[in-house]
Amino acid sequence: MKKIACIVPYTFLPASSGGQKLIAGFCEYLAAETELHVFGTPENDVALAKNYSLFPSLKTSQLRYADLSLYFKLKKQITEQKIETVIIEHPYLGWLGWMLKKSCKVQLIFHTHNIEFERFRSIGKNWWRFLKTYERWSLQKADLIFCITEEDRKGMIEQLNIAESKCILVPYGIKQQTIPANKLETKTSVCKELQIDPSTSLLFFNGVLNYKPNLDALQVLLNKITPLLVEQKLNYKLLIAGRHLPLQYNSLKDWNSKHIIYLGFVDDIYRYTLAADVLLNPVVSGGGIKTKMIEALGLNTSVVSTISGAAGVSAEICGEKLTIITDGDWKSFAQGIIEAATKPSTDIPTAFYEQFSWKKIIQKLMSVLGK
């Protein structure tokens, strides 16, 4: 069985954000096919690590990204465990990967979640040029790069001068492998909990709400899209979930009369995504794949998204469940919501699960990694 080490530079267990869920799912399913050792931070809940060993090797502070002692610590463990391949989440520890590759003679892989310099440029960080130089250097030292979207794969080849043969598409995965049978039952339960008529169309938006791309999307929902939905007299409730909503929004109480309910942070995001008729994804910045959209489609929930928000997902494999609208065309976005909420329901094609279930993703990946 192939021996692999995965280095994760931040806490991911328990997993709540899209990036954390990506790492947790990737490690869980990779561990079913390999002997996996994960090196992470002390805050991880070790009890949630399924079928792999999890070592609290990295420091808690931001200094871990420049901690030279980490190299000596991991070199010792990689040598003792006879690790053959090292996978590093994100390119920020590129220096560490390069040193381990040289000294331990291991295969070096970076598992990327975005083109990082593009993400930071899109949210206005002026140091993106420095990051681009470092990101290019790090990725060029790798033997393979796992790219989360085809757009990222092409971007790395064209913008960062990475050899095409190194760039492998490894999309965000979901545990779901078939259409869920309890969607209507779950909607009925959520409507009863929130005192909503079950005939009402449930719209859903979620995300960490102090993250600029998500906050910008929320402002679009409040100021651009909601007035259009009210004008068209759609029978709906828009449920908004997520932590860190800025205080000036006053828990969206002023928007209750416009069919908006703020749920705050919810432990079971799966339940509300399953209950929803339509997930809204009016995101126009931030880069990478929008994991909440993949999860919603896997739960047979319709999605209306901007072009930017739909990066990494082919409309062809989603049938009628995915509606993609030009960035900034909010009138068409609102019309897309109305159509998705009122037209007869169809199911997500089985081809979707072939591409996005973790089980299928890792099975394909093992043909690249070898047993």
Image (tube, grey):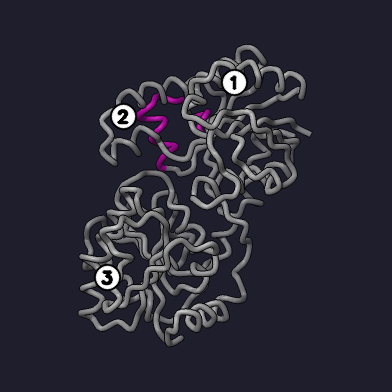
State the residue in front, 34 or 44: 44
Indicate which disc, 2 or 1, sits on the residue closer to the N terminus.
Answer: 1
Q: Is residue 187 above or below residue 314?
A: below
Question: What crowding class fits label 3: few (fewer than 14 Cα within 10 Å), some (14-19), or many (20 or more)?
Answer: many
Q: Position of residue 14 (x, y in %)?
A: 59, 49
Indicate which disc, 3 or 2, sits on the residue closer to the N terminus.
Answer: 2
The span shown in magenta is 151-167
State the residue in front, 243 or 82: 243
Q: Is residue 210 above or below residue 183?
A: above
State the residue in front, 363 or 63: 63
- Point out the frontmost of discs 3 and 1: 1
Given contact means CB atoms under 8 Å apart, are the residues at marks 2 and 1 in contact?
no
- The dot on residue 334 is 3
Query: What is the three-letter code of the residue carrying label 3?
Result: Ala
Q: Position of residue 86 (x, y in %)?
A: 63, 27
The residue indicated by pointer 2 is 128
The image quadrant where one finds the N terminus is top right
Indicate which disc, 3 or 1, sits on the residue closer to the N terminus.
Answer: 1
The residue indicated by pointer 1 is 70
Q: CA distance from mark 3 to mark 1?
A: 51 Å
